[in-house]
Amino acid sequence: MSFRVGIGVDAHKLERGIPLILGGVRLDFDRGLAGHSDGDVLAHALIDAVLGAAGLGDIGGLFPSGDDRFRGADSLDLLREAYAQVAAAGWRLVNADCVLVGQEPKIAAHRAEMRKRLSEAVGGGEVNVRATTTDHLGFTGRGEGLAAHAVALLERP
Ligand SMILES: [Zn+2]
């Protein structure tokens, strides 16, 4: 059995007038994440973590921001597609741990649903979702954007 770990990091700007999607769940919030797709930082960090662990490049290479096919894309679809490539290379997700970095919104009430949706997109592998603030420091602390970090462990028999 071989094992590989990967890390993913992402950040997007918060802007008014767009829905906030995190971990595939739409949250009731006054701003959303700007991006070429739906801006789902948790899904994007997880995509890079599984691609990184499998040595398959990164989200920008797989889904170029200049490509109109991915404009407004559901990031869970992108995660599903990225994981299909990881699985095609013989890897299976053991577990992933994702951390949202931001002062608000609070995600506790949505955590279970986020975990379920992210897990479904990666073949049922265990996905944890957590959140942390930065004590009002930096762009996430000032509410200018949200960031996410993820680590993923893959196994190949
Ligand atoms: Zn992103």
Image: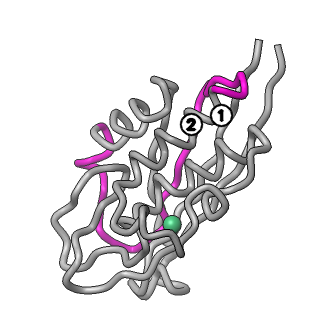
**C-beta proximity under 8 Å, tags 1 and 2:** yes
Q: Is residue 140 above or below residue 120?
A: below
Residue named by callout 2: 83
Residue at position x 34%, y 54% in the image? 74
Q: Viewer-proximal residue, 25 or 72?
A: 72
Check disc 1 and give the amino acid type. Val
Quadrant location of residue 103?
Answer: bottom left
Quadrant location of residue 22?
Answer: bottom left
Q: Is mark 2 within 8 Å of ligand 1?
A: no
Q: Residues within 10 Å of mark 1 (few under 14, many from 20)?
A: many
Q: Is residue 102 magenta?
A: yes
Q: Secondary structure at mark 2?
A: helix
CA separation in Å, label 1 and label 2: 5 Å
32 displayed left or right of 86? left
Q: Secondary structure at mark 1?
A: helix
- The magenta segment is 88-112
Q: Residues within 10 Å of mark 2 (few under 14, many from 20)?
A: many
Residue 26 image position (x, y, % from top left): 22, 57
Q: Coloured how?
A: one colour
Residue at position x 40%, y 61% in the image? 40
129 displayed left or right of 26? right
Q: Is residue 66 above or below residue 127?
A: below
Quadrant location of residue 31?
Answer: bottom left
Residue at position x 43%, y 88% in the image? 142
Residue named by callout 1: 86
Q: Viewer-proximal residue, 150 or 121?
A: 121
Q: Looking at the rendering, in which quadrant would you find the C terminus? A: top right
